[in-house]
Image (tube, helix red, strand yellow):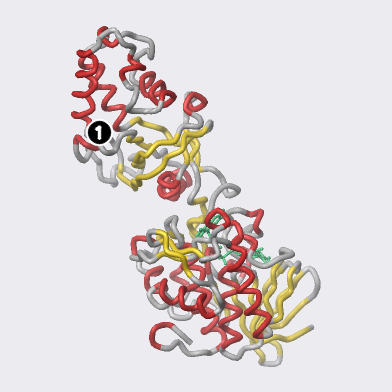
Amino acid sequence: MRSVQVIVIGGGASGMMAAITARRCGAGVLLLEKKENLGKKILATGNGKCNFTNTMQSPECYFSSRKDFPWSVVKKFNWQDSVSWFQEIGILPRDRDGYLYPLSGQAASVVHALERELRRLGVQVHTGEEVLAVQRHNKNGAKGFAVTTDRGEYLAGKIVLSTGGMASPVHGSTGDGYRFAQGLGHHLSAPVPALTSLVLEGNFMKAWSGVRIQGKVSLYGDLKDGGRGQLQKDVSKKEGSSRKGKFLAAARGEIQMVSYGISGIPVFQVSRFAARELERDRKPVLYLDSLPDYGEEWIAAELLRRRQRDGMQSMGDLLEGMLPDKLAGVLLRQSGIKTAAAAEGISKERIEKLAAVIKGMRLSVKAASGFEKAQVTAGGVCVDEVDPDTMESLCCRGLYLTGELLDVDGTCGGYNLQWAWATGYLAGIGCSGGRLQKGGRL
Ligand SMILES: Cc1cc2nc3c(=O)[nH]c(=O)nc-3n(C[C@H](O)[C@H](O)[C@H](O)COP(=O)(O)OP(=O)(O)OC[C@H]3O[C@@H](n4cnc5c(N)ncnc54)[C@H](O)[C@@H]3O)c2cc1C
């Protein structure tokens, strides 16, 4: 049985960062990765371009059951630290409205730079080796961990668990780390898919499939929590007619209509809240604002003006130039109006109702698309049980936890990788007994 000072389990973003940092601090490190190659998920990030961090950082960009935890970690290794850390190993940043990518435009260059650094430092890397079990080990007074893989057994003084969550299991993250962490005394906040599309109730979605608009989605929970949630009587006339339920989240940008529901970055951003509601057996409702730059009253007045100008045109024609045809058809049907009906036959009240539907079409969310489609996991190992200075477990000394495995998820835009770099860095220092210098650099 081989003995190693530190074993890092999982060669993804946070694991590679932890292994490099621990080695730089002088520790002997073995990195175990079950896939044939390191960093498979990094290759898929940012559509193959790797949005590796973001210059706009605030506590609101990160979510956790313990609200202050993510920021207390990210503050210690922030986006500037990520940029200079990667610059040191050859990755120059490209800034696109605050979203940072490698200047090469290739995620592969990030993975290759990390691999070269692991090699340069002499980190032992075993790919294609799956960890099956991790147990506490205490023989002859020597405390540590026994790690069983599909190839053999190792003893380690310290363990860094960097196995990711459950999102996108094709890239290797299948939730193994939850089992290992629970076995060592940790608890979980139920993992749910996040940054994913939403499946809607109803059978109208085939009619809008393929449409893309600049819109806004607002998510509301139901009041099954015994009425504790605040009732959100809407907001302003600009937002649409009154909506019932507890306001959870809203986002704006390019929305994509698909045959099973709704997708696009704004939907991704609110999906974690929808998935959590559904996991608690509540039914979230999404309101789609198809014309976020215009108020409901203005839209109603404009439709009435169009009707008065040419009453013989169809209701479909009335909406032309305002909304894509397919979406207009769905909104009309939702308002109980036939697309072919002559505008002059539609009452003012019906037109006002149509304006309200344009501003807030009510969509019942059936499900969040599963982990296969999700970019991240919300939930995970409870962060109450982790030291935010070192990422060391408070339940099991010598165990360190990083990245998506923890109950932290970021918004879309480089925040999840920033979380992976920050936690990997702190764990690397923690497990090797290194010292964090001012400004977060070694
Ligand atoms: C399609 C897609 C696009 C994304 N785009 C972005 C983006 O542009 N910007 C951003 O910030 N975030 C993005 N993310 C999210 C980001 O990639 C992850 O949050 C981040 O990679 C998590 O890092 P991690 O180290 O925690 O886990 P992972 O990167 O998932 O790594 C975990 C590693 O552990 C290995 N492993 C698991 N179990 C075992 C075991 N038993 N034995 C050995 N090895 C094991 C896995 O094979 C894997 O390599 C994206 C995610 C996806 C799926």
Q: Residue at x 53, y 75 (%)?
A: 424
**Tag 1, which secondary structure?**
loop
Q: Is residue 182 left or right of residue 438?
A: right
User: In which quadrant is the N terminus drawn?
Assistant: bottom right
- Above or below, 12 against 81 in this view is above
Q: Residue at x 68, y 80 (%)?
A: 119
Total number of numbered discs in the rendering: 1
- Which of 118/126 is in front? 118
The quadrant where residue 290 appears:
top left
Residue 147 appearing in the image: yes
Rendered location of residue 219, percent (x, y): 36, 42
| Image quarter where ligand 1 lies | bottom right
Can you tell me whether the CB of the residue at mark 1 lies under 8 Å from the nearest atom of ligand 1? no
Rendered location of residue 273, percent (x, y): 41, 49
- Which of 4/92 is in front? 92
Rendered location of residue 341, percent (x, y): 34, 9
* Callout 1 crowding tier (Cα within 10 Å): few <14, some 14–19, many ≥20: many
The quadrant where residue 40 appears:
bottom right
- Above or below, 434 against 128 in this view is below
- Above or below, 269 against 51 in this view is above
The quadrant where residue 235 appears:
top left
Q: Give the residue at mark 1.
A: 240
Rendered location of residue 106, percent (x, y): 58, 62
Callout 1 amino acid: Gly
Residue 382 appearing in the image: no
Q: Is residue 122 left or right of residue 48?
A: right
Q: Residue at x 44, y 77 (%)?
A: 81
- Above or below, 231 against 345 in this view is below
